[in-house]
Image (cartoon, grey):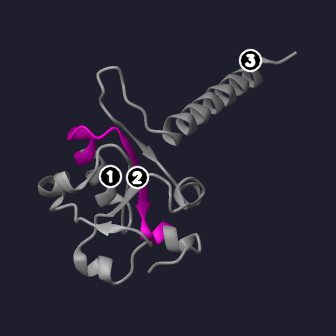
Amino acid sequence: MLNNRNRQIAIIAVALLVMAVTMIVLTQQPSATDDNTAIVGQIAPAQYQAQFADISADHVLIDVRTPQEFNSGHIDGAINISVETLPQRLAEIPRDQAIVVYCRTGNRSATAAQILASAGYNTIYDLGGVVAWTAAGLPLE
């Protein structure tokens, strides 16, 4: 039989497990709410490779760093639209495909994802940064 202290520890452990599973589920796939507001999904480099590595995968990969950073090395297939110019260049981004954004460390990509969500895009993934990409052993062009 569990004493009070062990019971409290068990309850906390179960609560943490439920929270962890909920976080994983919520960050796996972006989804729209009933009022069609986008939710941004986080995607890790390995997940991106598994889901979008096939060239026929219907998505747009956007590097939101500056043109100078982009030219110093970017993920193959990415287009460069800096986060500073993104609001003015939304017409260049199709609405019928998944959008994947990344930057150097993940700060600008989070901002870009929110700009896209506010503009009505529904399927948005934040890949984070090229720092995590290269740390995973993946190449830059």
Q: Circle 1 sits on which residue?
A: 110
**In the image, what residue occupies the spot 33% across and 35% down?**
38
Q: Position of residue 60 (x, y in %)?
A: 37, 57
Q: Position of residue 78 (x, y in %)?
A: 37, 68
Q: Secondary structure at mark 3?
A: helix
**Which residue position is annotated with label 3?**
4
Q: Position of residue 114 (x, y in %)?
A: 27, 45
Residue furthest to the front: 56
Q: CA distance from mark 2 to mark 1?
A: 6 Å
Instruction: Estimate the spatial distance between the alpha carbons at disc 3 and disc 1, rounded to whole Å.
Output: 43 Å
Q: Residue at x 29, y 21 (%)?
A: 35
Q: Residue at x 74, y 20 (%)?
A: 7
Q: Which residue is at the far right?
A: 1
What amino acid is found at the position of numbered circle 2 in the picture?
Answer: Asp
Tell me which segment is drawn in magenta. Answer: 115-132
Question: Which quarter of the figure is the C terminus placed in?
Answer: bottom left
Q: Earlier in the sequence, mark 2 or mark 3?
A: 3
Q: What amino acid is labelled 3 in the image?
A: Asn
96 lies above or below 54: above
Name the amino acid, label 1: Ala
The residue beneath circle 2 is 126
Front tag of 3 and 1: 1
Q: Is residue 125 left or right of residue 9?
A: left
Residue contact at pointers 2 and 1, CB within 8 angstroms: yes
